[in-house]
Structures are given as structure tokens and as C-alpha cells.
Image: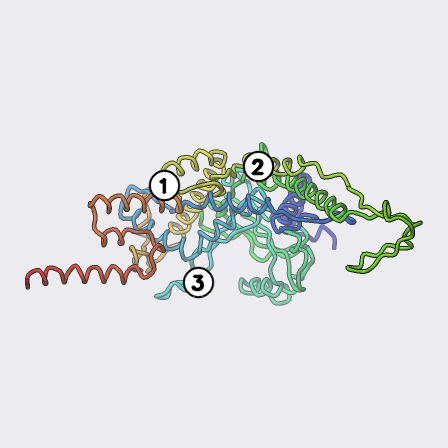
Amino acid sequence: MSRKNFTEDWKLYEKGKEYNSQIGYKSACDKNERFYAGDQWYGVKAGNLPTPVFNMFKRITDYIVSYILSSPLKINYCSDNADAALLLNKYAATKWEKMKMDSMMRDLLLDAALSGDMATHTYWDPTLNIGNGVYGDFVTEAVDGINVFFGNVNDRHVQKQPYIILAGRAMTEDLRKEAMLYGMSKKQAQEIVSDNDCSDQMGDFSSIELDGKSTFLIKYYKGDNGKIYFTKSTKTVVIRDNIDTGLSRYPISFANYTKRKNCYHGEALGTGLAPNQIFINKIFAMAMKHLMDTAFPKAIYDKTKLSAWNNAVGSAVGVTGEIDGVAKYLEPAGMNGSVITLIDKAIQYTQENMGATDILLGQNVRPDNASAIISLQQSSAIPLDGIKQELYSFVEDIALIWLDFILNKYSVERTVPIVNDSFIDFAKITPQSIRNFEYTATVDVGPSTYWSEINAVKTLDSLLQNGHIDTVQYLKRLPSGYIPKINELISELEAVALEQPIEQADS
């Protein structure tokens, strides 16, 4: 197919792929994803050498991701109208839970650790039934960094981009139906054909597909009126063209694990881990090969006295002449003990340099002094402050995007569910109740779950032992999961407490 038939957006997309190829982005992403999955001898012709995998790569990555997300995140809007801010905060908390954003954050942070980038795309789905005859709502989805193409590749700031292209794969028939839904004739829609342009997706398995899929592009750009427009197309067909989103911000959030100068892509955690992982696997493999070759010593014998060697248990061996010097076992050289020491040091230094210290990994930790442990944990996690702040800024961008959708797309009154403590309530959002006010968005970061629970329990223990609270007050404030059927226990204790005054009065 001639390039002159390609859409203009497709030509920009090809330039973006060429840039990724020049900086080795895809190969690094695929290698890190492979290492995380345990496929760490990919392409190596090991011969007779064992191929062990001691997956330090996955362990360090998982612990760092888990630690960074151990503190719960919550969107917080501030406004010159307190009622509007309170309503939006409750609604944002409900949307966060409904779209399972906590789980998405874990997936996104893992993406950043393996590819260097994490990204989300928030779009308007007009088919969602909100109730009371109202349709349409925003949806946030995770996007692989390799499918995000900035117009200015030397600037990582989303809102400064001349355009942003998102690439994806979809069923060809679904793209045809979408095109006809927005006015394209069936004949024109048939020009959307399936392709095999899947080799530039994330991971080795992305190139293995069933038939009937096509690559689509969504290009966002700023119009002369300051609003965000988009065009959706395939390689040769424009499905939707110059659509005004009504938004004032690009609906894309983007962040790096480690920033690189003059490049919108970041450096992955795994890129620095992989060489050390290779070294550890190779040293272990050679140590194993040495043991396999030397663990069972070779026998040598005098052929003038023995006609053949027989290892059969309990069998008699015929000897000609004296038995002295008939046979002996060779004693091979032992393996240098510094090999194991080197492996241990390689693992230790790798963990420490990546910020995955013993305190963070939960090794050699006695939880008998929660305050001291928390202090040690916080100081040991200082190398991770950069990615933590990047994550918080990333979530703030999501909050601002949500606010943009609410202010510009919620054009009629809608009744929405909100969470009040432990029950679901309903509130009305009208344009008059939220528009024409100033807003800012921040992220509230809660305490680290595990150690804050330990600290809370120790504080409650102290209050109970010193008589400042009773048993029921203690149980009501105990973190969940410590005592089974705790509500039944509280009810029983309260019932006993009510009976005691009656018994005392009768006596």
C-alpha cells in the first residue's frame, strides 16, 4: 500500500515509532517485561549449562511497588464554595472506587517500573446509562507508555504538547460499526481492514493475535478556541474528524519512573536491575555446573588387575594379584567459597541501591517497637521519594481531568451515588451547583497501612492497660481482621454490661 494513501495522523504515528526505535524504548520494555515474568535466559544458547532463575528482579519490583502504594490515596478538591468541594470530594471517592483505581494504580506503577512510563486516558462514553434518562459519563483506562506519542518528544509536560496520539488495537468489525454509527456509509466502512501492525505493542505476546484486528489512532490537539479536539482514524480511514471534546485539558495523564533529560520517556526500574540479575543467574549456573561435574567423583583403576569397573551394589570384584592400588577416587578441586559470598553481596548491594533495604523488604525486622520501625522504614525509603512524588502528581492530573469532565460535560442535572461513611447515599449534581467556582486538586496520602495498624494496636493496648478505655471501646477501634466475629463479641459484651446494673439493683 502506498504511503500517500495513509492518513496524516498515521504518518505522525510512524515518526513516533521511529523515535522509540532510535532510543531503544521497545526493546528495553520487552526485556524488562520478560525478566519480570521469569524468562531471563531468552535467546541464550546455554549448551550444557543449567539455566536457573533466582528472580530477584520480580521480588524487588513487587516490594517497591507495594511499598509506594501502601499508603492509600484520595483525591481532594478545594474551592471557594465549600459545599461544591464537599460534593465533588464525595463523588470523586465514589468514582475512584467504582473504577477500581487502587488496582489500576498498582498496574500503572508496575508499568512504570518495567517501561519507565505510566499513562491513563479518560474519555467520554455516551452509552453509559446514569439513570433518569441521562446518558454519558467519563471513564479512565490505563494505557501502555509505548502507545502514547507526544508531538514534542523533548518535553514531558502533557499540557504543553502540540498534539498527543494514542494508539491501540481493536476488532476491525467494531471499528466499522463505530464509523457507521457516526454517519459513515457501509461501503466506506468496509475500507477499514484488519492488519498485522501489532509488533510495536508492549510485550512479546503482543505480536500473537487472532485475525480481525486493526490499529486505531486517537489524536488530541488544541483548537483556536482553547478547547481540546480529537480525530480517530486507522491507517487509511478517518473514523471521526475534528471533534470538539468541550474540555480545556488533554484527558491524558503521564508520568515517568525516573526522568530523563530532553525525553518524554522515563527510565525503568528494571533497566538497572537486569544486568545484575543476569550476573547472578550466570554465577549460580556456573556454580551448579561445577557441583554437577564434581559432586560424584570419578573412579580410576588398574586395568592389569581389573578387567572392568563394576558399580553394582554388593557385587564381587575379581582382582588379579595384590589388592593394593587396584582403584581410587579422584578428588576434584573444591569451589572457591568467595563465589557464594560474591552472589550474596551482589544481591545485597542491588537491593540497597534500588531502595529495597531489609527494613523495606521485611527482613530481619522485629515488630516490637512500631515507632522505631516506622522511623527506620521512612529513612530507608528516601531513595523512593522521587517516584512517590511523581505518583502523587500523576493522580493530581487525573483529578484535574475528572474535574474538567464534570464541569464541561455534566450539562444537565444528574443523580449520582456517593459514599457516606459505611452506606451509599445519592446526591444531585447540577451545572449551577458546581460551575463558576475556582477549584484546585490535591492528593491526600494516608498512613502506611501495615505499620500504622501496629502503632494503633500498641496505642490501644496502652490505653486499655492504663484504664483510659474499656474493652468495648478498645474492640470498636481495633483495625479490622485482628479478631474474628468481632461485632458479635462487642454485642455480647454490651449485653453483659447492661445486665450488670440490673443484677446490682436487685441485690
Q: Which residue is mark 1?
A: 440
Residues at badges 2 and 1 in contact (C-beta under 8 Å)? no
Q: Residue 136 sits in which quadrant?
A: bottom left
Q: Which residue is mark 3?
A: 128
- In this rendered view, identify the residue nearer to me: 423 or 9: 423
Label 1: which secondary element? strand
- In this rendered view, identify the residue nearer to me: 205 or 222: 205
The amino acid pointed to by label 2 is Gln
Residue that protrudes farthest toward the right in the picture? 304
Residue 390 position, x and y percent, is: 48, 39
Query: Is 236 displayed left or right of 431 in the figure?
Result: right
First of labels 2, 1 by sequence position: 2
The amino acid pointed to by label 3 is Leu
Mark 1: few/some/many CA within 10 Å (<14, 14-19, 20+): some
State the CA–CA distance, disc 3 to disc 2: 51 Å
Q: Is residue 276 above or below residue 50?
A: above
Q: Which residue is mark 2?
A: 348
Label 2: which secondary element? helix
State the CA–CA distance, disc 2 to disc 1: 43 Å
State the CA–CA distance, disc 3 to disc 1: 28 Å
